[in-house]
Image (cartoon, rainbow, N blue to C red):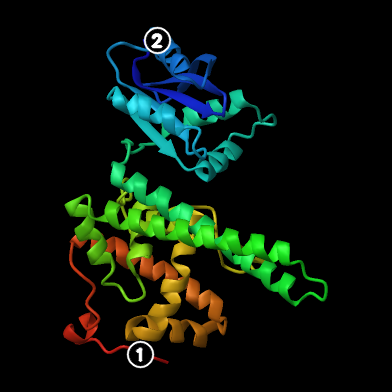
Amino acid sequence: MKTVVKQVAGIDVAKNELVVSFGKMHDDWTPELCAFKTFANTVKGYELMLKWVIKVAEPQLPIRFVMEATGVYHEAFAYYLDNKSLEVSIVLPNKISNYARSLAKNTVTDKTASEAIMLFGLERKLDRWHKPKKVYRDLRVLTRERSQLIEERTMLKNQLHAEQIRADSSDQSIGRMNKRITLLNKQLLEIKKELSEAAISDQQVKQDLKLLCSLPGVGELTAATIMGETNGFDLIRNKRQLTSYAGLDVREKQSGTSVKGKPRISKKGNRHLRKAMHMPALSAIKKDDRFKAVFARLVSKHGIKMKAAVAVQRKLLEMAYTIFKTQKPYDENYFINQGVTLQKN
């Protein structure tokens, strides 16, 4: 008789509903879909779903709840499960979609999506997710809001400039634009104050932010963005995983001698984190010999400055992770102290 060694509830989370596939893995490593049901994406729906899963599950084994990171729709449900000390894993959507393609299913529905998530959870060893500390949530919300307001202000300034140089410009329109820009400036100052307050609210986070700011080009805002978007590097186990999460990992397609695509970054990751590394990388290239040498070497290799700058972004993010893990500030003379000579060209 087969013995169940693992059981997983795979949940496809939508705005209004939870599509749940429950499955088990047997000791001969054959997965089995045991049950399927849909629930409302509400607290009442969470309660009904939990009762249903417990009813169909093996009582002696833990249940792992696996879901995709679907914007904000999954958060309330994930918090509910974590508050009850249940095992939760949250997976990036691109990993699930790549896995689902390997199943060779011709039909894509909410049910097949939840089945793919369930099978993925059964076959893979996933890290357990815990809700982030409040300070990380605050940093993420505030840095994202600030970025959005900056984009809105830039758009308004461009519109204002265009209106001012028109032959038949409208004083009323110019006045309204100026008022909106003034309001945005006020809100940006409020966010700056709230970010500072959040950064000092936790002593360890305050220390971590200070360490990250030791990196060339990385200021308080970039450090806060990195910490907020990674939840303090929670569930990040290595540099490769971090660059993949940020979408800075390199994808290359090559087969024999006839198929050879240009290497590109995947961009299938956290765009907020990727965007935050752009200006710091350009600054690091100008100010720091180590990053200047990396940039010069890559430009001399392929001649594409933007491609080399992206590589510096990746390197800078990896070093932020190393600094966080070692709790040691950046040392610009590290290679000199180790007796290594930097090559600038």
* On-image quarter of the C terminus: bottom left
The answer to whether one can see residue 156 in this image is yes
Up/down of 194 relative to 43, above or below: below
**Badge 2 density bin: few <14, some 14–19, many ≥20, Cα 10 Å:** few
Task: Give the SS element for disc 1.
Answer: loop
* On-image quarter of the N terminus: top left
Q: Earlier in the sequence, mark 1 or mark 2?
A: 2
The amino acid sitting under disc 2 is Lys
**Badge 1 density bin: few <14, some 14–19, many ≥20, Cα 10 Å:** few
Give the residue drawn at x 49%, y 71%: 310
* x then y, percent, for residue 196: 30, 58
* x then y, percent, for residue 46: 43, 18
Quarter of the view holding residue 65: top left
Q: Are the residues at dot 1 and dot 2 in contact (C-beta closer than 8 Å)?
A: no
Q: Residue furthest top?
A: 55
Instruction: Identify the residue position indicated by label 1 in the image.
Output: 343
Give the residue drawn at x 39%, y 54%: 241
* x then y, percent, for residue 343: 35, 90
Depth order, front residue of 298/49:
49
Up/down of 225 relative to 305, above or below: above
Point out which mark residue 51 bears.
2
